[in-house]
Amino acid sequence: MDQRIFEQGLSVEGTSLYLLMVSLSDRGAPLTKDQMLSIWNGDPVDLDTALTELAGRNIVAGAPDGSWLVNPQSQWRLPA
């Protein structure tokens, strides 16, 4: 996990989803929406909004197989 996530000005949901995704990735679990929803304790709409936020900043990216990838900090877009 890159501590700089806390300096990005993300929503609580966006930051929470990043932490969830890093945890899953560290365990070798696939970063699929179903896998994330099985742990996510919020509304599924909030998960979609958080994914959009993270993807919009290139913190995460969609993979060709429909799963997600967590990008290294060097690929993140800076907050406006």
Image: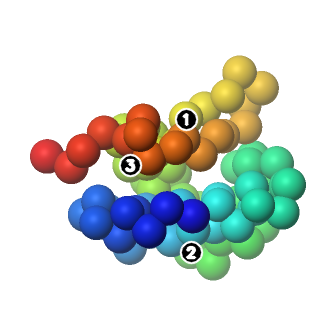
Q: Nearer the viewer, residue 64 or 46?
A: 64
Q: Is disc 3 in contact with disc 2, using a CB cutoff of under 8 Å?
A: no
Q: Residue at x 40, y 63 (%)?
A: 5
On the picture, is 79 further left or further right than 27?
Answer: left
Q: Amino acid at mark 1?
A: Ala
Residue receiving disc 1: 61
Q: Quadrant of residue 70?
A: top right
Looking at marks 1 and 3 on the same chain, the residue that comes earlier in the sequence is marked by: 3
Visible residue check, residue 29: yes
Secondary structure beneath dot 1 equals strand
Q: Residue furthest left?
A: 80
Q: Residue at x 75, y 46 (%)?
A: 32
Circle 3: is it few (<14), some (14-19), or many (20+) Cα within 10 Å? Answer: some
As drawn, the label of residue 53 is 3
Marks 1 and 3, how far apart at CA: 11 Å
Residue receiving disc 2: 42
Secondary structure beneath dot 3 equals helix
Q: Amino acid at mark 3?
A: Glu
Q: Residue at x 65, y 59 (%)?
A: 21
Q: Residue 65: where, in percent of width, then height? A: 77, 26
Looking at marks 1 and 2 on the same chain, the residue that comes earlier in the sequence is marked by: 2
